[in-house]
Image: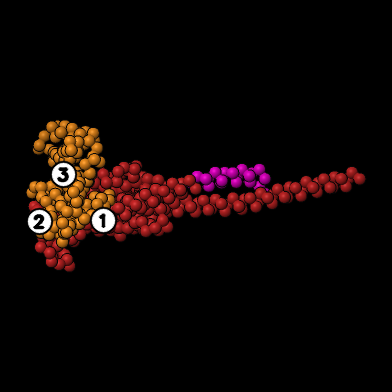
Amino acid sequence: MATLKAIRKRITSIRNTQQITKAMKMVSAAKLRRSQEAVMQARPYAEKVAALLRNLSARVSKEAHPLLTEREEKRVDLWLLTADRGLCGGYNANLIRAAETFLRTHRGQKEIHLAVVGRKGVDYFRRRRVELAARYLNAWGRPMGEFAVEIAEKMIGRFIRGETDAAYILYSRFRSALSQVPTLEKLLPVAGAGAETEKITIEYLFEPDVKTLLANLLPKVVEVAVYRSLLEAVASEHGARMTAMDSATTNAADMISRLTLQMNRARQASITKELMEIVSTAEALK
Amino acid sequence: MAEKITLRLVTPSRLLLDEEVDEVTAPGALGQFGVLPRHITFLTLLEPGEMSYKQGDRRYRLAITGGYAEVLDDVMTVLADAAEYADEIDVERARGAKERAEKRMAELGPEHENFPAAEASLRRAQARLEVASQRDHR
């Protein structure tokens, strides 16, 4: 049986941990609110760019621009967005598992190059001696717009130079603080060209012309998609951490109440023992 | 004036403006153009430069750094890479960016593959400075 002193020490230590998890939870909650707002505010632009792309690409064929042209997927890039830090429940593990699944399904048929954002993912694949085409550490604190442009440029460069035939991005989509879903999206080649579904009903006056507009818009489409994925990933990370820290705080509270009960029992036992000793000593002295 | 156009100005990070205005001018790929109510359906590339719109008696001026503009049924949507009102512009920063870009262009020479990128950032800085300078003597 643990001594009274040992239990007291244990309770103090758990209480300290609880204070830390509680603080982390509150910090994550504040950051989550801000990152959720960023996701919402980025939406109108993304929607408008998508509408513009539908409008323009319906007027051209798949061969009109290299970024639209589909090639046989022999070589594929997978961009994986993980966090730099842990203590966020299964967030990183879920993403890495999804990446492993992707690798397994295509192994043997395609050559896959991995590009990883975030220390957790980079460390994981380094331990397994997987070569990475690109890695980004401590990048989540950078201005997101700038970072998105950098990734998009790298992605497009590899595709244009023929180093890859397609680019996928795997990130965590933010559904709620409780639910973040690893999501796979194909960013290159840009889908939607030559689609007959969109009827061309409105006659536009284009300046300078459809081709130039499209050539300008396509890299932007990729940038926007990367930007949105980054924002969703940030919101997901904060959501996951908030939830993880919330349950850690609750667990600590449970442990404290269990140990307090144990401590009271131990104290009671020692009082009873002392009383008995006094009584029996008094008896013996008679 | 009864007729108005709805101007929506969107940047990647937020919806900057969604209001009824009387008149808009913007820097198109083929030169500055103006939009009044009942404009033709129109889609254009935007260059870095000054965009302005009139609402009643007031004219508002912004620097934009390129993007797209669409006019459809008296709704004008401007997708700008970045947009700032004249009094929001950080002149110091723009001046610094201009100097950096000029230096880079001089170093690289017009044949270098990064030359167009440096030139583009020079033009963005110039657009900001231009719009900002006019706010001072008004």
Could you give the CA–CA distance between mark 1 and mark 3, rounded to whole angstroms? 23 Å
Which residue is more in the foreground, A236 or A155?
A236
Tell me the chief SS of the magenta region.
helix
Which contiguous range is marked in magenta?
A: A1-21
Specify the amino acid type for callout 2: Phe
Determine the residue positioned at 87% across, 45% down: A282
Colour that chain A carries in the picture? red
Q: Which residue is mark 3?
A: B50
User: In this orientation, does residue A64 appear?
Assistant: no
Question: Is residue B138 part of the magenta span, yes or no?
Answer: no
Determine the residue positioned at 15% across, 52% down: B23
Asked if A38 appears above or below B138 in the picture, the reply is below
Could you give the CA–CA distance between mark 2 and mark 3, rounded to whole angstroms? 21 Å
Q: Which labelled disc corresponds to residue A44?
A: 1
Left or right: residue A119 versus residue A187 is: right
Chain of the residue under the numbered disc 2 shown in the image = A
Q: Determine crowd level at label 3: few under 14, some 14-19, many 20+ residues with C-alpha closer than 10 A.
A: many
